[in-house]
Structures are given as structure tokens and as C-alpha cells.
Amino acid sequence: MVSQHHAPAALKLSIRSGWRLALMGAFSFLLGACATSSQQDAAGQKNGSWAGVPIGTAPAPNARIKQAIVTRAKREWEFFGRQTVLLKDGEESIPHVGAWEDDSDHHSDRVNVYWRTVKEPQLTGMDCSKPWSAAFISWVLQTAGVPAAQFPPAAAHATYLAAIIDQADAPRRWFVPRRLSDYSPQPGDLICASRGKSRPRIVNGYVSARALSGMSGHCDLVVGASAKTLDVIGGNVRNSVSKTTLELDGKGRLQPSAKRAWFVVVENRL
């Protein structure tokens, strides 16, 4: 099942290092020589903002990597027997049960592969008390070609989410946060929910990197979208890699519920 015991991660949130600030300062100086303030304002409006801070300019598109992310997730879902979860009218059902993390050495060892991505080589699927959903997401993105500089592999979702939010204003970031009310999730995006009682403080739909400290959470990768439903794949969902189909509202937006307390979408801008 989706673990109720995601271990709180000690988030190492700090002010960006001096060299990065110096580099951004130099970059901004160069831009100032060739871009007018009106052009910069237009770019800021196009990319949106997060909690009042303009999101940085978008990266160059890379459809190959974006598709590889979705393909990797689907292949892992198939490896685990295509377990399917439905969330409809606030109720959850599992119309098809697949293989679980501890069903066999074959599947347990696969979970170990995910754990190795986040430097936990001693853990396997037999360690059922250790939630591996963040390790799964980290493995999918890393093996699809996403560099750690764009998505830091982490054993807890809160850790990489804090980094994404903290760096949203930097130029050419592949992943940026979006409010549920502003954005309809698309394939390649992540949708994230808090778990249990560890709900982050959300102000007007925004959450800060600091507010994620100690949060227990879960993220799924979007693999399909229609006007009314969303298909997402996640690890450690009911003890397996599962595909969940959930309902969207009339505008194609996520609807938080008791089963999934969604609070942020991470847009994949590739």
C-alpha cells in the first residue's frame, strides 16, 4: 500500500551557494545588455510565478527524454503485473491486483534497484516498513536521462520537492511547481500529496520549501490525461508499482480528497 510511514527527511535547505549566485548574476548582466525590461516582463508572465516570484525561463524542449520518463514508468508497471487502482467518488478500488514488493526475490530485487539510486543499497522489497515510492520516482527519472542537477534523487519526496520549489526562479529548470487551481497535469508531470497528519502549510495554494520539512508525502508520475481523468503511476502504491486512474474537475484540475491530499503539481517543461 501507499506507505503511511514515510520517514521524515532532514531537509538540508540552505541558501544557494555563492558560485551559483555569482553565475546567475553574471548571466543576468549579460541578459541586460540584450533584453529590454518589457521583454523580461513578458517572459516572466509567460512562465508564470510561484508565491509571487517569477518562474525562470523555460528550457529547450526535449521530447525524447520526456517520453522516456513515461515509457520507463509504464515498463515498471508491466514488470509488477499491471496492478490497477481506481479513485472514483472518493472511494478506492483495486480491480486488478499485480505482484507485490515481497512476493518473490524477483520483485524484491527490483525494489533494491530503486533503492540504490538514492544510496540505500541494503534495502529490498522485503523491507516492507521502508517506503520506496520516492526511490522509484528518482530511479525512473535518472534512468530516463534526467541529470541530478535538474532532479536530485532522494529517499523522501519532500527532499526533491523542496529543491524544485527553492530553484523555481532559476533559468532553464526542467521541473517547476504549479498550483492545483492554475494547471492541468500532463504526461511527464508529477502530482504530489501529503500523507497522514503531516500536512504542509499552504497559503493561497502555494507551499514553501521550508514548509515541507518533515513532511510525509507521495508523488505519482502522470502517464495519461483526458478531459475528465488522469492516469498516474507510482511506486509503493498498495505494495506494488501501480497505475491509478483518478477523476479531474470540470476544468481538468486535480481534486484533493481524503484518499489523496494533493497539494502541488510539478510541471515537466521538456
Image (cartoon, rainbow, N blue to C red):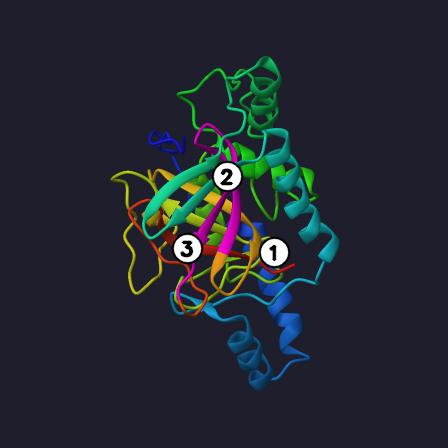
- Picture coordinates of residue 72, whole percent (x, y): 66, 40
Residue at figure coordinates x 58%, y 45% from the top left: 151
Residue at figure coordinates x 36%, y 58% from the top left: 255
Q: Which residues fall within the magenta stretch?
A: 230-249
- In the image shown, does 201 or 69 lie closer to the viewer? 69
Residue 236 covered by magenta stretch = yes
Label ID, residue 84: 2
Residue at figure coordinates x 53%, y 29% from the top left: 98
Mark 1–mark 3 Cα distance, whole angstroms, equals 16 Å
* The N terminus lies in quadrant: top left
Q: Are marks 2 and 3 in contact (CB under 8 Å)?
A: no
Residue 257 covered by magenta stretch = no
Amino acid type, callout 1: Trp
Which quadrant of the figure has residue 79? top right
- Picture coordinates of residue 65, whole percent (x, y): 71, 50
Mark 1–mark 2 Cα distance, whole angstroms, equals 29 Å
User: Is label 1 in a helix, a strand or a loop?
Assistant: loop
Circle nearer the viewer, 1 or 2: 2
Tell me the residue that label 1 is attached to. 174
Which quadrant of the figure has residue 130? top left
- In the image shown, does 247 or 107 lie closer to the viewer? 247
Q: Is residue 59 visible?
A: yes
Which label's residue is closer to the chain start, 1 or 3?
Answer: 1
User: Is label 2 in a helix, a strand or a loop?
Assistant: strand
Amino acid type, callout 3: Val
Which label's residue is closer to the chain start, 2 or 3?
Answer: 2
Tell me the residue that label 3 is attached to. 264
User: Is label 3 in a helix, a strand or a loop?
Assistant: strand
Circle nearer the viewer, 1 or 3: 3
Q: Is residue 12 visible?
A: no
- In the image shown, does 77 or 135 lie closer to the viewer? 77
Mark 2–mark 3 Cα distance, whole angstroms, equals 23 Å
